[in-house]
């Protein structure tokens, strides 16, 4: 009997996970279309999830599986994301690169918070968008959301916004590149310091050739590297704010240790002690993106379009302003 009941309880879990996988797969298929290709599968899947919730409501009967994707798979994706960070390359560039990356992160978060207070915009969304703009887009938002105790709908909305706006900025960079008095390496550094996600940096850096793209990715990975100390700082701040009782304390984000472990593995073990075939590494990369997309579908199902209209428009405009200012600052920095 217990075994039977256990199988029943597993059904909504597996069905819910399968449902998020189906919408994630649909997002991947949509992202292969010409007009949607630039925004990527993550933003496409979030949009599908929001539209499903709007027209059909939240599928309560499979909530446990959807929540598993939104929370547990989200952490798994962040851990696997660590493989994309080559610590040895970043450290070889030394303090100057990390210092510029730290300035970028502090500037983006600070300007977003300042503008949000001046315009009375939604604080949670503005902070998430500031962190996403400064660090590494939706991945950073996903990593810090549990620390900030952000609402699921705020996480999904901010991830969708930054994916779309970041893509538009990346396309804009490629259009103005021939007009700029920058060589390939300088342009790559500018793109890597200022654009939102690794995919956006790759999109904008590709026209600058291997040299420009390599410099762009290097500058970007330095910002990803700083995600860990930023997260620890946020844990400290949140615990300090909630020091009125033990129930308000923030648990240590243990998944970040997995992120660090995977980064160390990819940086110092894989390729030195043994080599994983590139086909397998490419498969892991695609799988990581798919798992993150499943997680974002789970979060997207919690989004109400009415809430988007009422509180997301102003933070989105502030993020655009912050991104423009960040582009100007980093252009001056190079």
Image (spheres, rainbow, N blue to C red):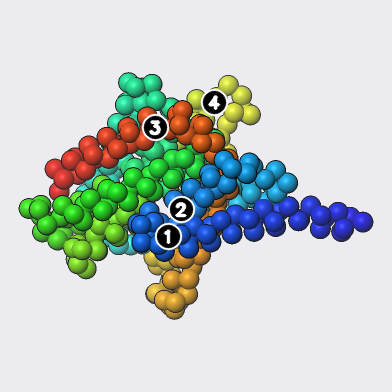
Q: Secondary structure at mark 1?
A: loop
Give the foreground label among 4 and 2: 2
Q: Return the residue nearer the eye: 220 or 122.
A: 122
What is the x, y in percent for residue 186? 15, 55
Label 4: which residue?
A: 242
Q: Return the residue nearer the eye: 282 or 172.
A: 172
Label 1: which residue?
A: 31
Q: Quadrant of residue 82?
A: bottom left
Task: Evaluate if marks 4 and 2 touch, with contact meaning CB atoms under 8 Å apart.
Answer: no
Q: Secondary structure at mark 2?
A: helix
In the rendered structure, find residue 313 and report the number of the disc placed on it. Answer: 3
Label 4 or label 3, whichever comes before in sequence order: 4
Residue 284 visible in this rendered orientation of the protein: yes
Q: Secondary structure at mark 3?
A: helix
Label 2 Cα crowd, 10 Å radius (few <14 / some 14-19 / many 20+): many
Task: Evaluate if marks 3 and 2 touch, with contact meaning CB atoms under 8 Å apart.
Answer: no
Residue 218 in the figure: left or right of residue 315: left
Task: Evaluate if marks 2 and 1 touch, with contact meaning CB atoms under 8 Å apart.
Answer: yes
* Residue beneath the point at 70% across and 57% down: 14
Label 3 or label 2, whichever comes before in sequence order: 2
What is the x, y in percent for residue 205? 24, 60
Label 2: which residue?
A: 44
């Amino acid at each position: 009997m217990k075994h039977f009941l256990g199988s029943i309880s597993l059904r909504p879990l597996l069905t819910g996970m399968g449902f998020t996988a189906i919408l994630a797969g649909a997002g991947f298929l949509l992202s292969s279309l010409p007009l949607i290709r630039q925004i990527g599968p993550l933003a496409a899947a979030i949009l599908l999830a929001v539209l499903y919730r709007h027209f059909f409501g939240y599928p309560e009967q499979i909530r446990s599986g959807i929540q598993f994707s939104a929370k547990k798979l989200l952490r798994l994706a962040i851990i696997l994301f660590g493989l994309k960070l080559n610590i040895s390359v970043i450290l070889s560039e030394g303090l100057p690169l990390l210092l510029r990356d730290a300035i970028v992160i502090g500037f983006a978060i600070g300007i977003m918070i300042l503008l949000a207070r001046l315009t009375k915009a939604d604080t949670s969304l503005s902070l998430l968008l500031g962190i996403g703009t400064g660090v590494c887009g939706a991945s950073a938002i996903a990593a810090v959301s549990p620390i900030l105790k952000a609402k699921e709908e705020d996480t999904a909305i901010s991830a969708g916004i930054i994916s779309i706006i970041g893509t538009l900025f990346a396309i804009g960079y490629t259009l103005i590149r021939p007009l700029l008095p920058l060589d390939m390496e300088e342009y790559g550094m500018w793109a890597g310091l200022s654009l939102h996600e690794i995919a956006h940096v790759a999109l904008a850096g590709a026209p600058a050739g291997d040299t420009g793209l390599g410099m762009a990715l290097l500058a970007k990975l330095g910002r990803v590297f700083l995600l860990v100390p930023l997260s620890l700082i946020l844990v400290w701040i949140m615990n300090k704010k909630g020091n009125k009782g033990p129930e308000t304390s923030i648990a240590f984000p243990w998944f970040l240790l997995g992120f660090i472990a995977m980064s160390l593995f990819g940086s110092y073990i894989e390729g030195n002690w043994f080599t994983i075939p590139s086909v397998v590494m490419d498969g892991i990369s695609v799988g990581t993106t798919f798992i993150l997309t499943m997680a974002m579908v789970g979060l997207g199902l919690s989004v109400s379009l009415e809430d988007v209209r009422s509180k997301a428009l102003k933070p989105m405009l502030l993020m655009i302003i912050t991104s423009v200012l960040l582009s100007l600052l980093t252009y001056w920095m190079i």
